[in-house]
Image (tube, helix red, strand yellow):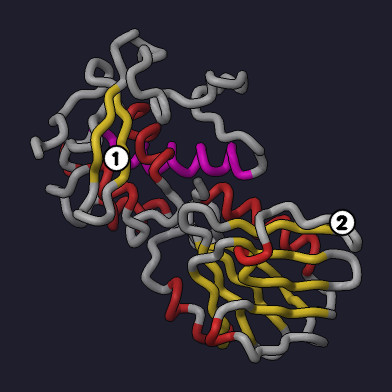
Amino acid sequence: MPEGDNVWRTAHRLHTALAGERLLRSDLRVPRLATVDLVGREVLEVVSRGKHLLARIEGGLTLHSHLRMDGSWHLYAPGERWRGGPEHQIRAILSTAARTAVGYRLPVLGLLRTADEDSVVGHLGPDLLGPDRDADEALGRLLADPSRALGEALLDQRNLAGIGNVYKSELCFMAGSTPWLPVGQAPAPDRLVALAKRLLEANKTRSARVTTADDRRDHRLWVYGRAGRPCRRCGATVLTADQGAEGQERVTYWCPSCQSGPSPPAN
């Protein structure tokens, strides 16, 4: 599940492979971009903004993509077999002399003027992995609606850009608060923002996400993905419930013993 650290890592890999090189092939397989030809243009840089990817291309253009739940970019050497998925799932191909970047199952793919990037990312809050990481601004946005459930506030990209469902559950556990606690009642929310940044920074170059400081398989996370299993800290059974607006629900994991605050509302 792509979160801010995954997307940062993807941007870093694409930047290392493509930046400073001219495109020898461009194939954008969405109807509105089917006639676009970027061949001959130089890739200037690839950066992440929260969960968004921005590939800036010579001529003032930006190729914007978002991975959402299962999109991905893969890099291949000349002659290497493509293994990211079947042909019909390919949405973008960008090739230089040395590498080919292939985007699979991209739910969002668009081309816009670089000067207009705010039209797709301007609504985002501070990116905890970006140059605009302003902890005070992030805290102010998080607390703007003090009655909102902590888990929902953490997931809202307008507050903190880059936190996904895994980090939401893990951060609430590490803060000792249930995801349904009003954010205005959360203890030390400033420390929570600092912790979110620290976890994202620590995991942005790792292939496997770790929040427990234990890198052994099946020991890396506190509660996420552990429904029905013992809490690592107290032994109570980890519970799950959906959280979020109708149609946007996400499965939330929490320990009813280690985390204080309201339980999920009854259906």
The answer to whether the residues at label 1 and label 2 have Cβ atoms under 8 Å apart is: no
The amino acid pointed to by label 1 is Pro
Q: Which residues are magenta?
A: 187-204
From the image, give the main secondary structure of the stretch colored magenta.
Answer: helix
Where is residue 12? Give x, y as percent.
69, 57
In the image, residue 88 sits, relative to residue 38, either above or below, namely: above
Tell me the quarter of the picture where residue 238 sits.
top left
At which x and y percent is residue 51?
A: 49, 58
Residue 247, placed above or below residue 207:
below
The quarter of the picture where residue 255 lies is top left
- At 66% from the left and 55% from the top, the residue drawn is 85
Question: Residue 201 colored magenta?
Answer: yes
In the picture of the structure, the residue carrying the numbered disc 2 is 80
Where's residue 183, x and y in %? 20, 43
Side (left or right) of 79 relative to 205: right
State yes or no: residue 261 in magenta.
no
Foreground: disc 1 or disc 2: 2
Q: In which quadrant will I find the C terminus?
A: top left
Q: Position of residue 133 (x, y in %)?
A: 48, 56
Q: Which mark is residue 189?
A: 1
Query: What residue do we see at 31% from left, 45% from top?
Result: 250
Which mark is first along the chain, 2 or 1? 2
